[in-house]
Amino acid sequence: MSRLPYEVQQIIDQQVSKLIRKDSEAMMQDKLLLLKSELIEAFLNHPVTEEILAGPEASNTSGTLGGYGNLFSFIGFEVDDKPIAEILKIFESIDFVFSGEVSSGNNFKVTFPTAQDIFDVTPMPWATGRSWAKGIETGISGLGYYIFRKNAQSRSEHGIQTSVNPRGSAQFSNTKYISDLLNKYKMKFLKLS
């Protein structure tokens, strides 16, 4: 059996390597898209997200406000705001890059957001430097001063903040949200690479 000249063998090895990389990138892309869709679906089906998406007339189905009013008007979004749009953009931007060949195949690096990435794009409408998404997890003050009222003269047109505390000891119920969701999915994404 004759051996191929070194240069020919090198060209063949390079072409095989390119084909294997192309195939593994296509498989990686399919897996990434499937997992990204799963993450986005979990986010959209979260009670907090559903309540915010329902807008200023929603009910407090997340239970964060003790069943009173809704998060959209309590947080103070403008009536036409799309508060979760920036979060969805971040989730949609999850991607991968080829990072080299290893003995077992090709290696990829997944770009996955941190909770802080989300907090940075979810500012409170009335307090720059604070994140409403983080507030869902750590608490948002002022629930006792919040009155849910339709056709109110406010950003959301459905909630006002008073200077007196008509609701007494009402307290915001912290809820697992972005950090918990990202923790659940981070390892799944990292296993792809």
Image (cartoon, rainbow, N blue to C red):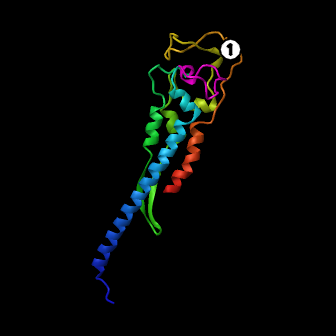
Task: Please state if 98 lies on the left or on the right of 182 as rendered.
Answer: left
Looking at the image, which is closer to me, 134 or 32? 32
**Is residue 130 in view from this perspective?**
no
Please provide percent x and percent y for residue 148: 59, 15
Task: Please state if 117 lies on the left or on the right of 9 as rendered.
Answer: right
Residue neighbourhood size for the residue with mark 1, other residues' Cα within 10 Å, grouped as few (<14), some (14–19), many (≥20) = few
Q: Is residue 63 magenta?
A: yes
Question: What is the residue that sits farthest to the bottom in this orientation?
Answer: 1
Q: Tell me where residue 170 sits by quadrant.
A: top right
Give the secondary structure at mark 1.
loop
Q: Tell me where residue 109 sits by quadrant.
A: bottom left
The residue indicated by pointer 1 is 167
Q: Tell me where residue 150 sits by quadrant.
A: top right
Q: Hey, what amino acid is under mark 1?
A: Arg
Q: Residue at x 51, y 11 (%)?
A: 151
Task: Please state if 143 lies on the left or on the right of 95 as rendered.
Answer: right
Would you place residue 107 above or below residue 48 in this image?
below
Looking at the image, which is closer to me, 101 or 65? 65
**Is residue 158 in view from this perspective?**
yes
Residue range in magenta is 57-74
Q: Residue at x 63, y 22 (%)?
A: 141
Would you place residue 16 above or below residue 26 in this image?
below
Would you place residue 178 above or below residue 102 in this image?
above
Please provide percent x and percent y for residue 49: 54, 32
Q: Is residue 83 magenta?
A: no
Question: Total marks drawn?
Answer: 1
Q: Residue at x 57, y 35 (%)?
A: 46
Quadrant where the N terminus sits is: bottom left
Please provide percent x and percent y for residue 134: 57, 32
The main secondary structure of the magenta stretch is loop
Would you place residue 182 above or below residue 189 in this image?
above
